[in-house]
Amino acid sequence: MKIYTMHTKQKLPITLDQAWLLLSNPKNLKLITPEYIGFNILSGADRPMYAGQLIQYIVTPILGIKTKWVTEITHVVDKSYFVDEQRYGPYALWHHKHFIKEIPGGVEMEDIVDYKVPMGILGQLVHPFLVKPKLNEIFEYRRKKLIELYGEFKG
């Protein structure tokens, strides 16, 4: 069983409060996700984030195949971090930690995703040229979109 890790950091010239408002509202995920992913929240995003919250959505990550994804917010520490874990969806394991901290001139946002692809050895074979590049593309889109929305960090 191979578990992969993706780790990204981004600095933004915004306050901790602004960053938390953006990240802690599940509805904002659509804003920072590429349109072609077809991200559509079905339920669970009707209130601010809390531990135990289940969010159901549809995504179209690869080859136009619509996929239902259910995540649970398992941990939340106000203005510090939260964790979402897939309960149902395209991955055999998805554990995503979101950290934010105040730094001089803004905030640093850090994402650590531990994931396992489905289909055993076949999944591992397609990971380097299908799954990993797609995840990199999604997180790169997010990075650019946040710069577009909030500006480049100059610190």
Image: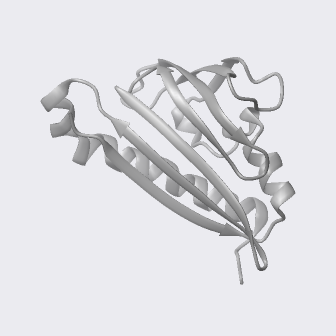
Residues 73 and 148: in front is 73
Q: Is residue 88 visible?
A: yes
Q: Residue 147: name its quadrant.
A: bottom right
Above or below residue 17? Residue 128 is above
> Outermost residue toward the bottom?
155
Q: Is residue 30 visible?
A: no
Residue 45 as seen in the image, left or right of residue 18: left
Q: Residue at x 61, y 48 (%)?
A: 98
Residue 62 as seen in the image, left or right of residue 80: left
Residue 140 as seen in the image, left or right of residue 124: right
Q: Residue 15: name its quadrant.
A: bottom right
Q: Residue at x 53, y 36 (%)?
A: 36
- Could you tell me residue 67's position as x and y percent? 46, 19
Residue 47 as seen in the image, left or right of residue 64: right
- Could you tell me residue 135's position as x and y percent? 42, 46
Q: Where, quadrant-wise, is the N terminus in this rendering?
A: top left
Above or below residue 155? Residue 46 is above
Residues 31 and 8: in front is 8
Q: Residue at x 55, y 64 (%)?
A: 9
Above or below residue 114? Residue 27 is above
Q: How many marks?
A: 0
Q: Residue at x 70, y 39 (%)?
A: 76
Q: Where, quadrant-wise, is the C terminus in this rendering?
A: bottom right
